[in-house]
Image (tube, rainbow, N blue to C red):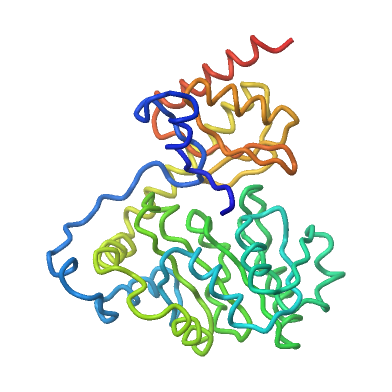
Amino acid sequence: MLEHGGRLQRAVQQYGIAREDWLDLSSGIAPWPYAIPEIPLRAWARLPETDDGLEQAACEYYQVNQLLPVAGSQAAIQALPRLRRPGTVGVLSPCYAEHAEGWRRAGHRVRELAEDQVDYYLDSLDILVVVNPNNPTGRLIPAEQLLEWHARLARRGAWLLVDEAFMDNTPQHSIGEHAERPGLIVLRSFGKFFGLAGVRLGFVLAERQLLQLLAEQLGPWTISGPTRILGQACLLDSAAHQQQIIRCAVASQRLAEVLSAGGFAAHGSCDLFQYLVTEQAPQLHEFMARRGILLRLFNQPPSLRFGLPASEQDFQRLARAFTDYRKEQP
């Protein structure tokens, strides 16, 4: 199992700090969960049905004609590699580590690429995987560039897989509307933007035939009845979408200012996190953890991802910790 953010219980045990005393900034999930709608008893008592309106609500939200709900985009990341014969997969790195791991596990040859290497290797790839905006760097590749790569790949029957897990805050940059094109697959995550990662819901946008193959691979009832009702309600609440977009943008900018005041300039960001590259990453991670502030540590390169604090109190707590850190530096 690969490392991920959100491992709060492990931090509780390691540092001996009560769970309620932690400020968990280790995952790029909006810290303001949408309100949970009333879940009728039938959703718990009956098998889930696919004509309850979830797919229609999601199609409207993502502006597509067809899609497949999955138990979090992670389910698709693990299943999609089984739909192709083993080949050569380029993964734009660094990125969410489960992508490279999923293709390797299915027997594919994985080549991790920097962005400036893609054009050179593209014609030798069977699949190119891009996380956009990138996790953890926040890098956003223009839609025109992605569609150009897709056109070159599609001429040979190759795929472009774009993981848009963090795209909800900037939907104008999505290429989901083009996902009916053969060989273009777009993954969307529900839990991050809506602050409800625990419900395990995501969507695959692609041509109909591929969605059918993936559905057969995953089997029936992949999304629970309560999750289907909850997801539909959130996807249809367009007024709340705009409020969440604005709130995340303001908080992300405020977070960048806290980092800067603490002596660190962010190297990348999106509206759900800030990304910091520094040789001090391990020490800073440990310093914060001993004060009950959990960050996401990456080793290559040494870096940290900061999720959004939820309140003024949380921002002030983080700022004070940076002040204390500077005082301890030689």
Q: Percent position (x, y) of residue 138?
A: 63, 49
| Residue with the most extreme left position | 41
Q: Quadrant of the C terminus?
A: top right
The image shows a total of numbered marks equal to 0
Q: Percent position (x, y) of residue 202?
A: 43, 65
The residue drawn where x is 31% and y is 63% is: 231
In-image side of 37 versus 220 (left or right):
left
Viewer-proximal residue among 324 and 56: 324
The residue drawn where x is 38% and y is 71% is: 58
Q: Is residue 192 above or below residue 43?
A: above
Q: Is residue 152 above or below residue 285?
A: below
Q: Quadrant of the N terminus?
A: bottom right
Q: Is residue 139 above or below residue 203?
A: above
The residue drawn where x is 37% and y is 30% is: 19
Q: Percent position (x, y) of residue 87?
A: 74, 79
The residue drawn where x is 25% and y is 66% is: 229
Q: Percent position (x, y) of residue 26?
A: 52, 39
Locate residue 145: give its quadrant.
bottom right
Q: Is residue 90 above or below residue 191?
A: below
Locate residue 59: give its quadrant.
bottom left
